[in-house]
Image (cartoon, grey):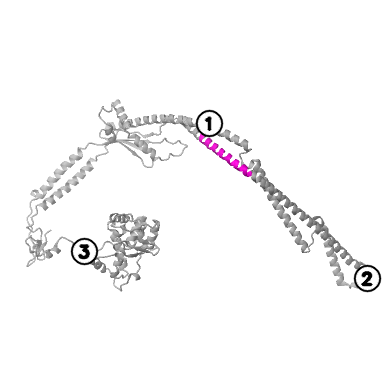
Amino acid sequence: MNPIQIERLPGLQTAPAEPLKAWRRSQRLWIFVSVVALSLSVGLLAVFLRPPIYRASATLLTTARPAADQAEAVVDPQHVAIQQVLLTGQALLVETLNRLEEDGLLAPGDMTPEDAQAMLGVAPIPATNLIELSAEGPRQELLAPLVNTWIEVYLETRAREIQATASATLAALREQLAALEAKIAAKRQELEQFRRRYDIASMERSENETLARLNGLTQTLNQLSEEEVKAKARLEAIRTAVAAGKPVVPQEDSRTLAALAARAQALKEELTSLQQRFTPDYIQLNPQYRKVPEQLKEVEDKIRRLVGTGQKAVLAQAEQDYQSARQAVAETKRQLKEHKRLAAEFSARFAEHEALLEELKQMETRQRELQDRVTQLEVKQPEKYPQVEVVERPFRPHTPIRPKYWRDALWVVAASLALGVAAVWLAEYLTRQPGLPETRLTLAGIHVYAAPETSPLFSPAAPAARAPLENSPPAALESPFPRELQRGELESLLDLADLRTRQTLALLLSGLTPDEIVRINAAHFDPGQGEILVPPPNRRLLPLAPRLSTWLAASGGSPLVPDDSEELAKLIYLAAVEAKLAEPETVTPEAIRHTYLVYLLRQHLRLTELEKVAGPMSLSQLAAYGRLLPPGNPKSLSEIQRTHPCLKL
């Protein structure tokens, strides 16, 4: 674009308008009409000369339909894929074309298997066992018979294969079943001989004589041990009572002792009452009262004799019971020890018996499985029921599926108009004369028009004079910084991003450049010290944010960083789109890093310490960031919060 020339006029003037050519004789109109007409002719001929393409389709169920009382069939993608390969096989297509030629629907040699394969399509329906078969082509009357014949040939081929497979499988199963029955008979005979040899009478371990006797002795020993403990405790209790002077008598003398004790107590009370009322001499002189002390002494003598005799009898009986219990326990232990040895030998034999029995059970289980499979093959007769069912047959198409003539025609019209406009612009650009002014305006007495090449502004001596006038927007309208994101936008990015994108965002919000991020690895992180060692050439220490430390631990300590800067920018852009941020194309790695640097500067960070976080910066970058410093006393890195609020726990 040519620079402008300004000329001041003595007064307010208006430049006279140049006479315009008649629009019918305009070169622009001629060029526009010619290009549009030619483009429309070629485009519309290409659109409407295309033959119509019709489509006929059918749907197959690749597994047998479940019965009314059975659950729905499980989706089997592998079975569907196998049927898809079989349907497109060369042999199946050749037989299909031969069948069509026999029916007179296709002339001999009119279509090759390659042509049929190009026309036919097989598409599985997702999450189902259904397959859609389709045929596309310009021959409207041939498509439905082609698909129907294709399906019939496939079903017949499938039925023959299933019949042959079923017969071979049935013969193999019967052979396996006969061999297995012979092995089962031999194993049963071996098991019976083993039982007789080692006297194993029952399948239950505890019901055999040796183990039953061992269990009985164990229970008897437990009972005798309890009786021994009780006898010893009773003996100790009797000895303690005797030592303490307490009356101990046999059970049959306890009533007599109780009666004597009651009689003695009554006499004592009566004697005490007499002693309180009368003097001892009076009591001795009175025959009635004199009998009370005598009776009391007689009763106490009986009690002493009874207690002495009872203690000896009870103590002797307790000692005898204790000794009997000890002898019974010792004898039972001896018998139990002997039976344990016999039981150990029996257990070893019984374990062998159980192993043989388990082998027999496995053989019998395998026999039942083979019998079930033979029965199913014989009863179901799979050759009559191939595992494919036609859900929907094809029908003759009436409406072509493509091309969309009128839609394509509208596109041709729009493209022709655009081509005409482009041709007019290209013609104007190629025929422009640079020696004449292009534009002339009269504003407040000033003519503004394009300067010729002979203007002093174009001389080699004045390159600096014309440089500011070249086509570029004013510098004041451009921002030297990328977009600055708000905290809510950053939170949305982090909440919706995956682990890899979160780690990348956190590294940008820690001050690393994109080139440093793609070269960082687990060795550059020190979770114990909470630091990040930036890889060379711009080594520096940055704080390890708490949330970044948590995300690193989730990936095993190794960062999931992108392989290159382009992939990193793609991650950030996709995260912005997922978070539905406005103008996601402006959310770049540089914008995330710029947001973090602005966060530090707004805390009055010294501009001289900014490179300790961001790395080396040019003079123009430092000057631009210097204009963002708020008024106030500058602070060092140790006096500000270096972790961004979005990365705190």
SS class of the residue under badge 3?
Answer: helix
Residue 616, position in %: x, y?
27, 65
- Residue position for label 1: 182
Of label 3 and label 2, which has the lower sequence position?
2
Left or right for 167, reference 434: right
Q: Secondary structure at mark 2?
A: helix
399 versus 606 height, above or below = above
* Type of amino acid under label 3: Leu
Query: Marks 1 and 2: which is nearer the front?
Result: 1
Q: Tell me the amino acid under the disc marked 2.
A: Leu
**Quadrant of the rendering where the N terminus is positioned:** bottom left
In which quadrant of the rendered image does the C terminus lie?
bottom left
Magenta: main secondary structure equals helix
Between marks 1 and 3, how big is the CA–CA gap?
98 Å
**Toward the viewer: 643 or 395?**
643
- Classify residue 34 by image quadrant: top left
Would residue 162 be counted in the magenta stretch?
no
Q: Is residue 595 left or right of residue 192?
A: left
- Label 1 vs label 2: CA separation? 117 Å
Q: Which quadrant would residue 317 be assigned to in this image? A: bottom right
The magenta-colored residue range is 343-367
Residue 108 x/y as whole percent: 26, 27
Which residue is tagged 2? Answer: 285
**Which residue is nearer to you in this view: 565 or 8?**
565
How far, Cα to Cα, is label 3 from label 2?
147 Å
**Residue 477 tag number:** 3
Q: Choose mark 1 or mark 3, whichever is in front.
A: 1
